[in-house]
Image (cartoon, rainbow, N blue to C red):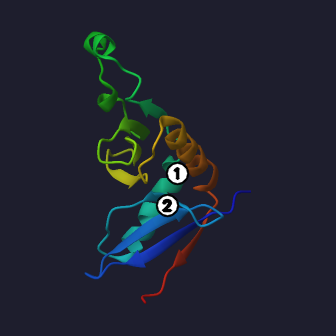
């Protein structure tokens, strides 16, 4: 069984967020902010459930393919994990994990290559369900 961890931290404004970490302590995915600890824990539960969602690779489409599709990759039903080119990420690749309701549960770190991004998604899928949850104390 994979042993990663979810680290819950409180922001300076009193909201909560989580980070999914590998066994070695490397972050894989980050959540947005949640108003309460209970709702943050529900976000973790949602990531556990949706970590095996289908992959929607938006990087694979060229202009001709995109023009011939009746359903765009962004219209693929949720839950899903969406891989995309991200000009703000170092190297340009990232991912979002979407819940069934279409909300973003978590996002990646930003990766230098598509291969590294796919490896991060594979790690997320491997450890998300069994990772333990820790609440990080304020420093």
| The disc label shown at residue 139, or none | none
The one of 93 and 1 positioned closer to us in this rendering: 93
User: In this image, 1 relative to 71: left or right?
Assistant: right
- Identify the residue shown where x is 33% and y is 76%: 36
Q: How many marks are shown on the rendered structure?
A: 2
- Disc 1 designates what residue? 49
Q: Residues within 10 Å of mark 2 (few under 14, many from 20)?
A: some
| The disc label shown at residue 45, or none | 2
The one of 28 and 114 positioned closer to us in this rendering: 114
- Gap between marks 2 and 1 measured at Cα: 6 Å
Q: Where's residue 42, x and y in %? A: 43, 65
Q: Where's residue 103, x and y in %? A: 32, 50
Q: Residues within 10 Å of mark 1 (few under 14, many from 20)?
A: some
Q: Where's residue 50, x and y in %? A: 49, 47
Label pair 2/1, CB-CB below 8 angstroms = yes
Residue 102, can we see it?
yes
Quadrant showing the C terminus: bottom left
Quadrant showing the N terminus: bottom right
- Identify the residue shown where x is 59% and y is 43%: 122
Q: Secondary structure at mark 2?
A: helix
The one of 80 and 11 positioned closer to us in this rendering: 11
Residue 98, can we see it?
no
Up-down relation of residue 23 to residue 76 (above or below): below
> Which corner quadrant of the image does residue 133 belong to?
bottom right
User: In this image, 57 relative to 4: left or right?
Assistant: left
Please, which residue is most extreme toward the bottom here?
A: 139
User: In this image, 18 relative to 129: left or right?
Assistant: left
Q: Secondary structure at mark 1?
A: helix
Q: Where's residue 22, x and y in %? A: 61, 61
- Identify the residue shown where x is 55% and y is 76%: 134
- Identify the residue shown where x is 31% and y is 67%: 33
Please, which residue is most extreme toward the right here?
A: 1
């Amino acid at each position: 069984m994979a042993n990663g961890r979810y680290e819950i931290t409180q922001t300076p404004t009193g909201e909560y967020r989580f980070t999914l970490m590998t066994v070695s302590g490397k972050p894989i995915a980050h959540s947005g902010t949640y108003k309460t600890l209970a709702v943050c824990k529900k976000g973790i539960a949602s990531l556990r459930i949706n970590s095996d969602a289908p992959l929607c690779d938006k990087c694979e489409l060229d202009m001709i393919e995109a023009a011939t599709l009746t359903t765009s990759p962004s219209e693929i039903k949720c839950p899903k994990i969406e891989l995309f080119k991200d000009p703000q990420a170092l190297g340009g690749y990232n991912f979002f994990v979407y819940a069934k309701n279409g909300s973003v549960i978590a996002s990646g770190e930003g990766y230098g290559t598509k291969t590294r991004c796919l490896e991060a998604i594979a790690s997320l899928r491997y450890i998300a369900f069994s990772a333990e949850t820790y609440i990080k104390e304020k420093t």
